[in-house]
Image (cartoon, helix red, strand yellow):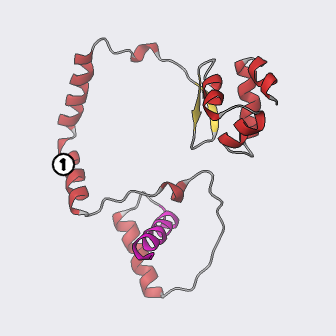
Amino acid sequence: MNKEQFYSTHPDERVDIINEMLKTRSYSEVAKEIGVPGSSFGKEMQRGDYVYIQRDNKFYKFIRDKTMVVSNNESATDNILSFIKDNQDILKKMISDYEYGNKMLILDERVYSNNAKFENKSIKMNNDIHKQFIEFCKKDYPFLTVQDLIAQSLLEFMEKYSK
């Protein structure tokens, strides 16, 4: 697709073509290949109510939900306050954990990136340490994979000890 075709193609058809290109290229590479500046590329792609989702590297149709319209700011504020009140204990614990560095774990984006290339690696490791780590993961972070926790550990190690 060239610049002229980009601007003249119907938004629905253009999104199909661009999404196909995005399967093997980045957002900026596609814009450059077409010959359109990144900002103009994004604005033009939004025509027809399309939005770009970076983690998927893809454009999607934005669907407006008319039932979600809030009548005024007071009802939105009431909803927020109600949520905070209903979840007060959980929010307090999260804040406490964050302040005191207890069990707050935020994974680096690189750990779970859709654009990352994954390979199997085998390493030789002290069996007792491995068992302790697996038990720790099961007990404190059962909702995360050991693979992700090891990747996060490696990133934190590099950050802490890099010169």
Along the line of sight, the residue nearer the viewer: 41 or 145: 41
Q: Residue at x 47, y 17 (%)?
A: 65
10 Å crowding of disc 1: few (<14), some (14-19), many (20+):
few
Q: Is residue 16 left or right of residue 43?
A: right
Q: Residue at x 64, y 36 (%)?
A: 58
Residue 32 vertical position relative to residue 63 in the rendered view, above or below: below
Residue 5 vertical position relative to residue 112 in the rendered view, above or below: above
Residue 57 vertical position relative to residue 99 in the rendered view, above or below: above
Quarter holding the C terminus is bottom left
Q: Would residue 78 be counted in the magenta stretch?
A: no
Q: Residue at x 48, y 67 (%)?
A: 146
Residue tagged by mark 1? 92
Residue 54 vertical position relative to residue 159 in the rendered view, above or below: above
Along the line of sight, the residue nearer the viewer: 52 or 7: 7
Q: Would residue 159 be counted in the magenta stretch?
A: yes
Numbered range of the magenta stretch:
145-163
Percent x, y of residue 143: 42, 57
Task: Kindly indicate the quadrant of the structure image that contains residue 69.
Answer: top left
